[in-house]
Amino acid sequence: MPSATDTLAEGLLPLPHPEAGLPGWCDRFLCPPGGNDVFSSRLWYDTVLGHALPAGTRPVLALAGGEKGVLLPLLRQADGRLCSLVTPYTLTWRPLPAPGAAMREAGLALGRLLRGGRPARLDTLDAEAPGLEELLAGLRQSGLVPLRFDHFGNWWQPLEPGAGWEAYLAARPSALRATIRRKLARAGRESRFELLREPGLALENGIRAYEAVRARSWKPWEPFPDFDAALMRAAASAGALRLGVLRDLDGQPLAAQYWMVSGGYASLLKLAHVEDARAASPGTVLTALMARGVIDEDKAAALDFGRGDDAYKPLWVSQRRQRTGLLLADLRSPSGLLALARQTAGHGRRQALQWIEKARRRQG
């Protein structure tokens, strides 16, 4: 692997020891500590590599265009296909450009790396990410066809600077406002709230409380049971963790959730409550307490409620954006043609044939 001082050559670079995290030369492509894109940071990727790699996969770094190009953290699946290095916890993924990267040229270089292989799948993408359209133009120029698909919805809301919790609460639906005020008053008498930010014994107790709540909640089996604790510890060391625990007066945890706050952006990663305590709405209480904290204390510029279109999310945040995906298909290969046929089946045979003909013309 190149060192931080090497001239970087493009290629598909395997990571033989993923538990050691990303090599140092990747830092020029990553979001710096304290930035507003924690899912493109070393903190995030090192934790994923150490605790959330699916069985049978191998991490690969696609470096397109060298040190002035774009880095794509990928996984090579057991069948050889390449896909984004994402997890069930990733809220957004994107190609990582070096400062001043020429995105169209990087896309052309990426196409050279992927041509002739099976279609690569890039998902969890922000369709409006800066430079993405230029990258796709370069991919098309290389002869690949980017086939878009919808992945999941993401609910979020930008916050007016200085408006504070009361202004935020006033904009919520009236039923939620009434529930929050009533339940917070009751919770003040019947429970206690803990907010944990820093490494140490208190955090370890909080992690155990989170795991106990999750085990007694409605949540399904956890595919990577070590990931949450590892991420909380790493985020606490970086000053980005906000772990909330709501306990009854006997000290038993009723609800737990953790957020990451970085660069003014507050993301709710995981939440759970004990099913037996549902009547007291401990999840609603804890979400209100945590949102109030990141708004009033952390001065968050935006709230992000994560993956999926759960019914409760539009009550708390007002805007939905679509996370998308791409299949990068080479129409000169049978697998590329098959991917195009499957992707365009709903558009009809004529449109699929038109796409194939246009792609062949671009290839000369």
Image (tube, rainbow, N blue to C red):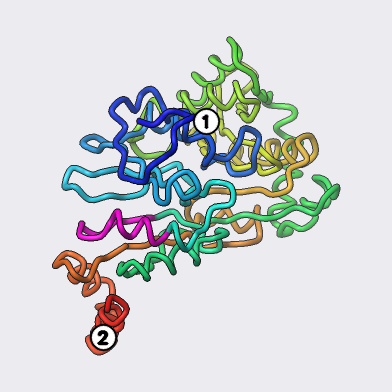
* Residue under the point 48% across and 59% down: 323
In the rendered image, the vertical position of residue 265 relative to residue 234, given as above or below: below
Question: Which numbered marker is on residue 63?
Answer: none
Tell me the kind of residue under disc 1.
Answer: Leu
Q: Residue at x 62, y 54 (%)?
A: 156
First along the sequence among labels 1 and 2: 1
Residue type at mark 2?
Gly
> Marks 1 and 2: which is nearer the front?
1
Front residue of 203 and 158:
158
Please, what secondary structure does the residue beneath circle 2 have? loop
- Whether residue 360 is in magenta: the answer is no
Farthest residue to the top: give it: 201
Q: Nearer the viewer, residue 148 or 198?
A: 148
Residue 161 vs 228, above or below: the answer is: below
- Which residue has dot 2 on it? 348
Q: Which residues are magenta?
A: 107-122
Work out whether residue 271 or residue 137 is closer to the camera in this orientation and state it.
Answer: 137
**Residue 100: % across, % down:** 59, 51
Residue 21 located left or right of residue 111: right
Q: Position of residue 111 (x, y in %)?
A: 33, 60
Say whether residue 347 is visible. Answer: no
Task: Name the residue carrying label 1.
Answer: 43
Q: Residues within 10 Å of mark 1 (few under 14, many from 20)?
A: many
Can see residue 40? yes
- For the residue pair 17 and 48, the one nearer the viewer reads as 17
